[in-house]
Image (spheres, rainbow, N blue to C red):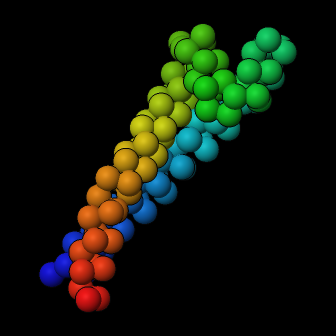
Amino acid sequence: MMDAWFLVFIFTVAILIAVGGALVLVGYLGTLPASFDHGWPYWLPAMLLPVAGPLWFAARHWRDFSRPGKQLLFGVLLLALAVGLLYGAGPYFVDRMAAGLK
């Protein structure tokens, strides 16, 4: 039964990372070229701060870039959830598997 729960754990983490990474990438690509169009005061933070810069740009121009901003925000939240799940529940599965080896 432990193998099935481990499989569910790994599958959940992998899906969260894949979907979160895709949303971050799509949101980033939706805001970065537009920040170039608005001049260097906008594209410089978007280039130097990979996640915070495009989020800042989307927040400054929310009416036009709310969709990429939401994609970036939810992508970052999904990645944070995956990392939290990995570091929170991962040691539990490692302890259970190590106990099975003894």
Can residue 30 be seen here? no
Q: Residue at x 61, y 44 (%)?
A: 25
Q: Compared with residue 28, is residue 94 higher up or lower down, i.e. above or below? A: below
Left or right: where 67 falls relative to 15: right
Can residue 22 be seen here? yes
Q: Image quadrant for the C terminus?
A: bottom left
Residue 15 pos. (x, y %): 40, 59
Task: Choose between 87 and 17: the one closer to the eye.
Answer: 87
Q: Residue at x 48, y 38 (%)?
A: 76
Q: How many numbered marks does the figure carry?
A: 0
Left or right: where 38 falls relative to 91: right
User: Which residue in the rendered view is the most extreme toward the left?
Assistant: 1
Left or right: where 53 falls relative to 65: right
Left or right: where 59 falls relative to 79: right
Task: Choose between 97 and 29: the one closer to the eye.
Answer: 97
Q: Compared with residue 63, is residue 84 higher up or lower down, i.e. above or below? A: below
Q: Compared with residue 44, is residue 12 higher up or lower down, i.e. above or below? A: below
Q: Residue at x 47, y 31 (%)?
A: 73
Residue 33 pos. (x, y %): 76, 30
Task: Specify the quadrant of the image occupied by residue 8.
Answer: bottom left
Q: Residue at x 69, y 28 (%)?
A: 49
Q: Image quadrant for the N terminus?
A: bottom left
Residue 27 pos. (x, y %): 58, 36
